[in-house]
Image (cartoon, rainbow, N blue to C red):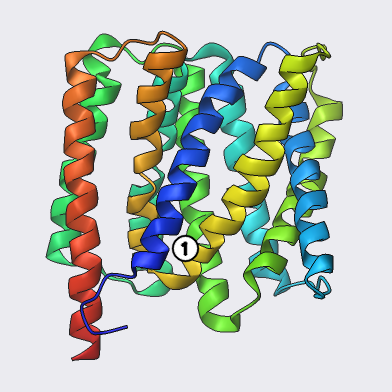
Amino acid sequence: MKAGEIDRGAMLLMMLTVVLWAFSWIEMKRLSTLIGAFDLVMVRYMIAFVVLLGLMLVSGRKPKLPPLWLTLGVAVFQTTAFQCLCQLALISGGAGHVVMLAYTMPFWVVVFAWLLLGDRPTRLHVVGFLFAGLGLVGIIAPWKGLGSMSGSLLALTGGISWGLGAVLAKMMFKRHSPDVLNVAVWQMLLGAILTWPFTLIFPQTPIVWGAELYWGLAYMGILASAVGWWLWLSVVQRVSATVAGMSSLGVPVLAVVFAWLILGERATNWELAGIVMIMAGLVIVTLAGAHKASGARS
């Protein structure tokens, strides 16, 4: 790839990931009355594990444990904590607002990437950061109240967990260059194992078996988890943690649109303005990533 050229392949993978994950928030909200929060997380990861393991075996590869501590760190913070915290937050909060609070994650990616990877933000990164931050404020509209404080804190903590996990994943790829599909297989397995004790400790919503639940689990397990995680790790492998994290802000933007169209959570003028600001921030961050790559190669 030439100096200053954007990795278009990685951006295409990111776009596909954004669509899959944005719609998953609608499914998570709809499934919250049919299955317990922890049960849903565990089942979706078990389905994803079976799908990805099958793909790996068909391709002739054998699952090998990636670097233990980094793999476990990603599993704890990004795979397990993020999903469990956000699923709990969705019980009391609307999908649009919960996803926006959870997707403060790219800001935490910037912070952790700076602290752990020395990936110092450029001036363009900071400008994009400010645009995206203002956009999130417009969508959250804190002057109207954040609804359930416990739900808000759960979503925000989930965002912090994701940010740290994403940087740990980037650290693993930089130091050890593991196979992306192999990492995804282990993340799904560990996510299911780490969530299982919580399904026993905390009371869960009785499972309502039926077609709606089956189709929802199929989407969450196969597309959102198996395919989505494979795509996401491929993006993290190819671009900086900062660019990957900020680009993922497309998920809450699209999720707000889906929540508006499907769940009837109508967007306000502030939310629409916030979407525009976030999109501007995404463009700036993408350009910053290309500019930084050009400077590193010159």
Q: At 63% from the left edge and 69% from the top edge, which residue is drawn? A: 180
Q: At 73% from the left edge and 47% from the top edge, which residue is drawn? A: 191
Q: Nearer the viewer, residue 182 or 20?
A: 20
Reply above or below: 296 against 53.
below
Q: Which quadrant, please, contains the N terminus?
A: bottom left
Q: In the figure, residue 131 lies in which quadrant?
A: top left
Q: In the figure, residue 290 lies in which quadrant?
A: bottom left
State the residue lying farthest toward the bottom: 298
Percent coordinates x, y for residue 168 in the rendering? 54, 64
Viewed as shown, does residue 143 lie left or right of 167? left
Viewed as shown, does residue 234 lie left or right of 202? left
Viewed as shown, does residue 207 lie left or right of 70? right
Viewed as shown, does residue 48 lie left or right of 288? right
Q: At 74% from the left edge and 43% from the top edge, which residue is drawn? A: 45
Reply above or below: 110 against 276.
below
Q: Secondary structure at mark 1?
A: helix
Q: Is residue 121 visible?
A: no
Q: Which residue is mark 1?
A: 235
Q: In the figure, residue 3 lies in which quadrant?
A: bottom left
